[in-house]
Image (spheres, coloured by chain):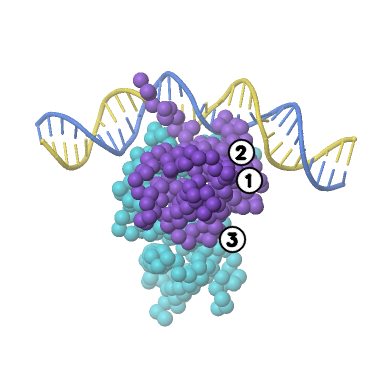
Chain colours: A purple, B cyan, C yellow, D blue
Amino acid sequence: MMHNMEEAEDLRVRRTRKLLQEAMIELTIEKGFAGTTVRDITERAMVNRSTFYRHFSDKYDLMDQFMHETYQLIGDQEESFQPGNECHTEYKAPVGLVSLLKHVQTYSSFYRVMLGEKGDPSFTQKVLKYIERRFRHLLPNMGLPNKPTTLPVDLLVSYVSHAGVGAIVWWIENAQPCSPEQLASWLSRLSMADMNRALGSEGE
Amino acid sequence: MMHNMEEAEDLRVRRTRKLLQEAMIELTIEKGFAGTTVRDITERAMVNRSTFYRHFSDKYDLMDQFMHETYQLIGDQEESFQPGNECHTEYKAPVGLVSLLKHVQTYSSFYRVMLGEKGDPSFTQKVLKYIERRFRHLLPNMGLPNKPTTLPVDLLVSYVSHAGVGAIVWWIENAQPCSPEQLASWLSRLSMADMNRALGSEGE
DNA sequence: AACAGCCCGTTGGATAACCGACATGGCGAT
DNA sequence: ATCGCCATGTCGGTTATCCAACGGGCTGTT
């Protein structure tokens, strides 16, 4: 049967969740995530506080679900990884990375806060974990040599993931001075070079 | 008893009306008022269509109530007309006029459409009627001479009201090149001069 | 210590909003 | 003229949301 997984929720449910998400993002930009209370969120969203708890256990849960939904949405268009054009011509950045950067750009004020001092450390962790998953998903597609290497793969993944966050932080702190496609191209070229060098010719 | 007139409506009611208003304004900016359907509005607002009709009879009613509410809100802070400082020093524009211009500035894109070709003529009428009421409310406070004048007061009111709309149109078409306070000062000085000249010394 | 003030998380009954369906009227295409 | 298509209004039955209230925790003030 494979009947629709989307569940086609009640309009009120989708609206309420959307309003609460938007309110959280706005307030986080204005007063930071720590300084934002559930009360603030529901007042801004014009939603009763008790209704909040029907959908989320607390503001962290709201944040989690927001991240999960959007990142899953981004990940859906990822799957098509074409291993044909990885050669030395102009790098065409993977479409998933571009989508991610466009999403970050849409909520740039939000990310600027959340990745900064007034944000939440667990948020940065979530972004890191997501990027790591992206890389791990990419790993088997590149010519991974089976020979035992002295450089642990986990170290490499952590390395390039943090580097990616660093690039994103630079990007949003400087008002996105280049297009998502441009940054995606640079980023993927850099990390690809890292991974090839690390996994390919060892000491070079 | 004089118990509160605000009625303290249900949160759902206020939220629904707000969402529908915002959706109408957005869509009017995008596709004009005539091209916007009730369906469009309810979809954008994430409100069921049947709920729309619980609050408004049609999109014109929605528009009417929006205008009425905001203009009444503006009118509330009007009442204090201080007749002390009308002399030749720097004109302090009446606070109600400044509020009106600030409101127009907030919805400038909306007003630009509604007062233009893709808008609705009845909207312009409503704005005119509101400004006329403002002037008529101001009239008795200035030294109105009882002597029969050859210039009909209604003519004067219509004249300065249309002039005011003209100033507003110029203002929003040129991306509000001056502050609301500045424009209010100019506008009130101009119309005051008109009314004084017309009602005071006749042929001068 | 006692207190006020705020926020949290939860509950039961009231109610606005949703959903689906129907009849209507306009409008363009066959 | 007839058909399909879409937007409009309108209608009960269902449901998510509101409201008011409660107890509990935490912080700062007298």
Give me the residue at 33% from left, 51% from top.
B31
Q: For the C terminus of chain B, which image quadrant?
A: bottom left
For label 3, the residue is B80
Q: For the N terminus of chain B, which image quadrant?
A: top right
Residue A74 visible within the image: no
Q: CA distance from mark 1 to mark 3?
A: 48 Å
Callouts 1 and 2 on one subunit = yes
Callouts 1 and 3 on one subunit = no
For label 2, the residue is A60
For label 1, the residue is A120
Task: Name the amino acid type tagged 1.
Answer: Asp
Contact between labelled residues 2 and 1, with CB atoms less than 8 Å apart: yes
Q: CA distance from mark 3 to mark 2?
A: 48 Å
Q: Secondary structure at mark 3?
A: loop
Give me the residue at 50% from left, 68% from top.
B179
Foreground label between 1 and 3: 1
Output the chain of dot 1. Answer: A
In front here: A194 or D15?
A: A194
In front here: C9 or A156?
A: A156
